Image (cartoon, grey):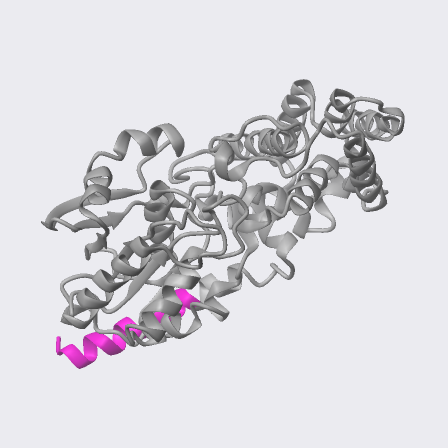
Amino acid sequence: MGNLLKAMILMLVLGYLQLARAQDYATYKTPQDWVIAKNYFATYVLMQDTSILPNIIAADKALHDLLKKRELRYKMSEGCKELSCFLAAFKWTSEEIESLTKTVVKHLENDKALATLFHNKLLPSHAYGISAGKKIGDYAAKAIRQDLHAMNYVIDVYAGAAKPNYPKIDSISFNIADPRYLSLLRDVRQDVLTDTRAPEQVWNMTLLTAVRLLEINERWDAAQLEPLISQENKAAYEAIAKTDFDRYPYSLLLTLGAGPEIYNQPISPGGMLRSRMAARSYFDGLAPFIVVSGGRVHPYKTPYIEALEMKKYLMDVLLVPEEAILIDPHARHTTTNLRNTARIMLNYGFPKDKFAIVNSSIAHIDAVERMEQRCIHELGYVPYVLGKRISPVIIEFKPTQEALTIDPDEPLDP
């Protein structure tokens, strides 16, 4: 088969894949939609069908009664005089989580609309791990249970000041000892009550509380710059379908960032040097695309998104064309630099059988070579397969499908 014909077939296939992927995001209208869908995808899927939950609740007296008691507990928080009272009202109880999980699984057996929804949306997403060969009931149970516990986690951290995984960069924004803080929680409560009047909306009380808390903590990072494929990544996203990857040794080059330590510094010296490494490899023809990865991380509450600043540097200083640059503006750690780039490769139509490469400092690539156990500890899986180290500062990798799995205790970049 000639190279021209191969390129034309590749363009058609990738174009179809890109269209299908773009349609997945068609319902994400607001930043709140992105925060919910990325963190609690099964719950988001249920929210999109306006008939399924009302029908289930109407037909299930035990579920109806559970939600009425849950609503009463939330409303009774008007009289709360201490933080623990608000936390108890805001969160699901362990018994409620198990009851709701069992209810969803039970209705899957005889509710055709619910089963179809989950078969068409939940299983193909792989958002709760690899779904191939899994029973829909088992997969749905894992998804619902994870969502409800993850909502509680956000409330513990961003209302209760529990320590997140990385307290120096992800902690609560408020002093919970300030007497005015309880007034703020009352305002959160009132806002949620306004949006949860119908029985099916009560199902989302804890969800909306978690989302409001992320918002007032200025922690809607999961939504920042979305949708990437029609904004910051549009030029490169469209160029992928036109690229003959056979002309390049590697499909893309991931450049790891180095977050600034000085507030109001847009890009660190390390970020500049690593961007230069990436530009050199790009102009040498190693890969047709560069991914720069890094969120709004260092220092605490910085206004700058690391990947965006590196993109600007690549374009303005190093003259790399925009259509060659993809950004991941969400990653907060080296583990998620690779995981999020793996997601880009899986979702944007990159060739599955071709290695990509990652570049950084020697010490950073040393750490990448030893990072499998850290990934398992923090993510629960390894989102990549490493290949050869082709230089002191560059190593090969391929994505694994596990990279699509949601990380429930990292709500800023799940």
- Residue 55, magenta (yes or no): no
Relative image position of residue 383 (x, y in whole percent)? 32, 42
Q: Is residue 149 above or below residue 407?
A: above
Q: Is residue 194 above or below residue 185?
A: below
Q: Is residue 97 above or below residue 132?
A: above
Task: Name the quarter where the N terminus is drawn.
Answer: bottom left
Magenta highlight range: 1-18
Q: Within the image, what quadrant is residue 355 found in?
A: bottom left
Q: Is residue 268 left or right of residue 176?
A: left
Q: Report if residue 139 is visible in the image.
A: no
Question: Given the current orientation, which residue lies at the most extreme bottom position?
Answer: 4
Q: Is residue 347 left or right of residue 4?
A: right
Secondary structure character of the magenta stretch overall:
helix
Q: Residue at x 53, y 50 (%)?
A: 222
Q: Is residue 171 above or below residue 324?
A: above
Viewer-proximal residue among 401 and 332: 332
Q: Residue at x 36, y 28 (%)?
A: 377
